[in-house]
Image: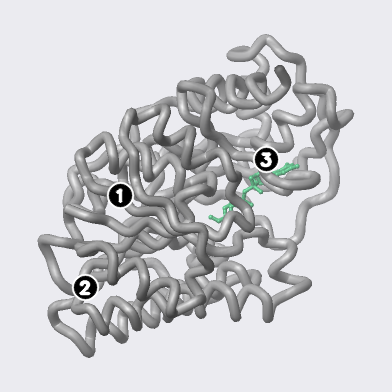
Amino acid sequence: MTVLLTGGAGYIGSHVAVEMINAGFNVVIADNLSAGHKDVPERIKTLTGVSFPFFEIDICDKEAVRGIFDSFSVDAVVHAAGYKAVAESVSLPLKYYRNNTDGALTLLEVMAERGVKAFVFSSSATVYGIPDTVPIKETAHTGDCLNAYGRTKYIIEKILEDLCRSDPLFSAVPLRYFNPVGAHRSGLLGDDPIGVPNNLMPYILRVAAGRLPELNIFGNDYPTKDGTCIRDYIHVVDLAKGHTAAVDYAVKHSGYEVFNLGTGIGYSVLDMVRVFEKVTGRPLPYKFAPRREGDSAEYLADPSKAEKNLGWRAVLTIEDMCFDAQRYEGGKEQ
Ligand code: UFG
């Protein structure tokens, strides 16, 4: 089976590529390298021992996308390309609406031309907005997104729902990621954000490396066990394996079926600090800072639907996430 993977040079996409190749899929990667790194395709080849076609194209370029479908008999598409910086999406919403929806529409249009029916989409738990209850089931209310980034994910989910309604043979599987962290155990692939990171783990890594003075913990007065926010952190390799299962599912079924990818286990920011210090032996200076706008006290997946229908379950621990993230960062320091 041949799978076109967009965003395959990015953080999530590169791990998805490795797991899909290991599972025996023929993978074709398209990435414009706007956030991904030039040497990532080579690293994926080193890790898997498998060569694969890599196209440095913008997926909003329909002719370029058609070129890929002309060259390969694509059975399914995993769409992981897209802008993802929440803060930037607030200041530059048009950039996000244009790029993220255009990329998805272009792919879907070319798939329609060529009769390709299986689409797995990188969505986000952010479509749930501020949840009424946790753990969050896929049936929970969506759409009250807190930023343009999240709304692009929501809009693409809705486009996919409409498409499935119009074409009973089409299969769309959005995967709602909770908080992906960690890195490949080899230390060859990981998260490499440009500039000062917004997300917790990349920020922790910079502090541990002495490149930033201390971690600011946003809020210690939330109604949680220690006052700091609780999140469902999931190892990126577990998340990637969820995509392999989702592709299998998408090619065997039709219709719209969305899945949470999370562990169902919550850790507070202070838990993360303590586990990171314990696992890596690196001290992590921190101070409490005011709450960050748009954060909710607790985000936690109910991952049971993915387990039941995809046969997938996250197995790696919070210790694995901290250890592997630090190992990747350490490799960059050398
Ligand atoms: N945090 C800090 N200090 C920091 C960074 C983060 O205390 O320097 C805290 C946040 O307040 C939050 C937790 O760490 O409580 C996790 O924050 P992240 O920014 O790592 O992750 P979020 O939960 O805010 O966002 C993540 C993804 C988004 C996605 C969202 C909803 O990054 O892409 O989950 O699923 F939309």
The kind of residue on which mark 1 rests is Val
How far separated are the C-alphas under marks 3 and 2?
Answer: 38 Å
Query: Which residue corresponds to the image point at 53% horizontal and 68% vertical from the top-left?
Result: 58
Mark 2 secondary-structure assignment: loop
> For the residue labelled by badge 3, is the local secondary structure a helix, a strand or a loop?
helix
Sooner in the amino-acid sequence: mark 3 or mark 2: 2
Q: Nearer the viewer, residue 93 or 33?
A: 33
The one nearer the camera, 284 or 251, is 251
x then y, percent, for residue 184: 47, 29
Q: Is residue 274 above or below residue 112?
A: above
Q: Which mark is residue 27?
A: 1
**Could you tell me which residue is drawn at 40 percent across and 34 percent down?**
45
Q: Secondary structure at mark 1?
A: strand
Q: Which residue of the protein is positioned furthest toward the right in this rendering?
A: 213
The quadrant holding residue 236 is: top left
Between label 3 and label 2, give the one nearer the viewer.
2
Residue that badge 3 annotates: 200
Question: If the image is split into quadrants, where does the C terminus sit?
Answer: top right
Q: Find out whether the residues at labels 2 and 1 contact each other: C-beta distance under 8 Å.
A: no
- Is 60 placed above or below 248 here? below
In the picture, the disc for residue 116 is: 2
Residue 30 in the image: x percent, y percent? 44, 58
Amino acid on which the number 3 mark rests in the picture: Leu
Ligand 1 within 8 Å of disc 3? The answer is yes
Which numbered disc, 3 or 1, marks the residue that appears first in the sequence?
Answer: 1
Q: Residue at x 49, y 67 (%)?
A: 127
Eye-nearest disc, 3 or 1:
1
Q: Is residue 137 visible?
A: no
Assess disc 3: are there few (<14), some (14-19) or many (≥20) residues with their C-alpha within 10 Å of its C-alpha. some
